[in-house]
Image (tube, rainbow, N blue to C red):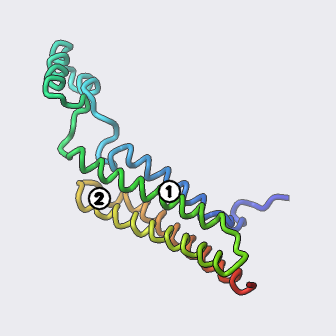
Amino acid sequence: MSVPKSQRGQSAMEFYHNALTLRQEITALLLRDFGLKKKVRTVEILTKMYNIEPTDEETLLSILNKYKMNSSVIDEFPTWLITEFRSSILIILRDLSLNIRMANSIYIQSKEEYIERRLYWDKAIGNCQQLLSEMQFVVETLPVNAEKYMRYVGMIDKEITLLKGVRKSDNKSLGRL
């Protein structure tokens, strides 16, 4: 017999599922350049948006090629900065996933394993704090709507709470040793 959804408890692996969701959601945000634009602006899209004639489109493409510029038309934000933010956030998200996986792969049989597992939980919590800090800097630096980022902040805070809960539950294992 199944339990109604409203009466179900929290999954024992909720911390892992939340981390995966967090990684997917933030990666989707990064693909949109932190919400600065809904899609990549290319010459082809601009010609459709502004009804540029085919001859003018060829002229625009030849100018971009002559000066060895990318065919993606850059807005007012430097590409290198967005790339740097994107890169650092992706690294933090990857490290968060790896630390969670490493901690969860250790089955505590000795005090040394408890300490090692706890260090991985601590690193994962630290990754969440790094992510919060990095996203705060993005909001302060780029002209993005801070309200749209509150959703991600909530997910990160939830992940911190879940990780602290799992880390605390490991204390029971230490007691039985």
What quarter of the picture does the C terminus occupy? Answer: bottom right
Three-letter code for the amino acid on which mark 1 is drawn: Leu
Give left or right: position of 67 versus 84: left
Q: Residue 3, position in %: x, y?
A: 78, 62
Secondary structure, mark 2, is: helix
Q: Which residue is mark 2?
A: 138
The residue at 19%/31% (across/down) is 69
Relative to 23, does residue 50 appear above or below in the rendering? above
Q: Which mark is residue 30?
A: none
Q: Residue 117, position in %: x, y?
A: 60, 72
Q: Which residue is mark 1?
A: 22
Give left or right: position of 26 versus 84: right
Secondary structure, mark 1, is: helix
**Between 157 and 51, which is closer to the camera in this rendering?**
157
Q: How many marks?
A: 2
Q: Residue 88, position in %: x, y?
A: 36, 56
The residue at 55%/71% (across/down) is 121
- When asked about the image quadrant of residue 115, the answer is bottom right
Q: Residue furthest top?
A: 55
Q: Earlier in the sequence, mark 1 or mark 2?
A: 1
- When asked about the image quadrant of residue 144, the answer is bottom left
Relative to 63, does residue 73 appear above or below in the rendering? below
Q: Residues within 10 Å of mark 2 (few under 14, many from 20)?
A: some
Relative to 3, does residue 77 appear above or below in the rendering? above
The residue at 30%/56% (across/down) is 145
Three-letter code for the amino acid on which mark 2 is drawn: Val
The residue at 14%/18% (across/down) is 59
Cα separation, mark 1 vs mark 2, equals 17 Å
